[in-house]
Image (cartoon, helix red, strand yellow):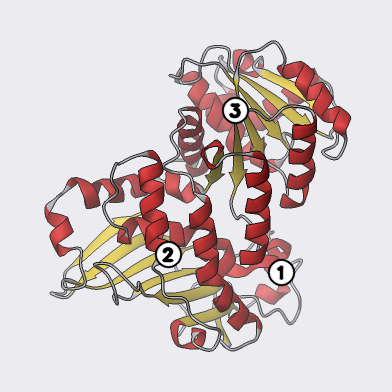
Amino acid sequence: MQKDPISLVVFGATGDLMARKILPSLFYLYKEKKLPRGFRVIGVSRRDISEEGFRGKMRDAAGKFDEIAKDKRLAGFLKLFYFVKGYFRDRYTYEDLKRVLEGHDHKIFFYLAVAPKFYKHVLENMQKAGLIHQNMFLLVEKPIGLDLTDAREIEKLFAKYFKEEQIYRIDHYLAKSGMDELFDFRFRKKFLEDIWTREYISSIELKLWEKKDVGTRGEFYEGVGALRDVGQNHMLAMLAYVAMNRPKAFHGEAVRKARAELLRTLKIYNIRQAKHFAYRAQYEGYRETKGVKRNSKVETFFRVTAFLRLGKLKGVPITIESGKAMPENCKEFVVNFKDRKQIIFPIETHAVKYQYVEEYKKILAYAFAEDDSIFLGRDEVLESWKFVDSIVLAFKKNLVPLKFYEPDHYPKI
């Protein structure tokens, strides 16, 4: 348990991210006595409700989790919640927030649970109100931007107000149990380093299949597609775990540096090369989804083969693929050896009812402990966009033809 008191300020506190992920995760940390003494949550939202109304809304959100709703500790937990009503563009919102924070010698974690278009307004007004100082940290969800140019602008904005070590970029896939086990397997067993090379490994595959389709996220999906939503946003960071060199230490900045160094060695394709290494497809019926264009060219499945320019795995094909409406749920790494043996790493190794809650418990606990090993660094974000950008452009220009596949079937590649 952390000794220093912490205030968690959540911008967008009446939204979906708070209700489904942050709130229940905080409750379980509270239940397990893993929150510091004096811990509190200050929600910031334009919603016209009182502090008691905000606590009531949090109670309603908690009620959707059976185990939490029945727990007698819920009432005590909700007393940790406070509320500031206001608009992100309004400087008086931040003056009100400052008054709530004053008089508490707390570390402050600001969680941007808002759309990226509000980042600039929030950060500028925080600075004007004197809310940014050395003893504070920023939590922000990936994806960072929609392409490399956009990501650079957002990172430039972050760097204007924060040091790199104050920024925690969240990718919940790095908090999955299987990633820990993969890391331990690779680096706690010394003999593996001798065979984790191109002399022994023929190929590596990373699969993230979902049996469900796009569902109600049609409008969102139209704006990003599977490659940006899953490939850039999650899979490249995970790929780094399976292919990176042994870090100098097994925590914090050393792990982030090792991942970034690996991503820096990815071979970058130009848009005309992309057709030789990328495949995309869309499941039949996607265009009938609400919010989707009738002639949509957006991929719901992709397969990309990557190569490293340097290192022990130089030249080994590393394939990432993900899709919606697949024949089964499958989240795994497969390492194929030249002697035809395989090692399969499941990414989710523990069946739990609320997977997100387990992941966000870990995310928040690591952040409060100031351990940034499961958070992305700036270089990781930019290097992953460098790899993906030309492929996305090739998709847009139809240089990689769009294929179609039946729901519940694997695409015919």
Residue 372: x and y in percent read 45, 39
Residue 237: x and y in percent read 44, 57
Q: Quadrant of residue 163?
A: top right
Residue 368: x and y in percent read 50, 28
Circle on res. 161: none
How packed is label 1: few (under 14 Cα within 10 Å), some, or many (20 or more)? some
Q: Quadrant of residue 407?
A: bottom right
Circle 1: residue type: Thr
Looking at the image, which residue is at 59% across and 75% down? 392
The answer for how far apart the CA atoms under marks 1 and 2 are is: 38 Å
Residue 215: x and y in percent read 65, 61
Is residue 161 left or right of 229 when viewed as pictured? right
The answer for how far apart the CA atoms under marks 1 and 3 are is: 47 Å
Secondary structure of the residue carrying numbered label 1 = loop
Secondary structure of the residue carrying numbered label 3 = loop
Q: Which of marks 1 and 2 is in front?
A: 2
Name the residue carrying label 1: 289
| In the depicted structure, whether residue 19 falls above or below residue 299 | above
Circle 3: residue type: Gln
Name the residue carrying label 3: 134
Name the residue carrying label 2: 264
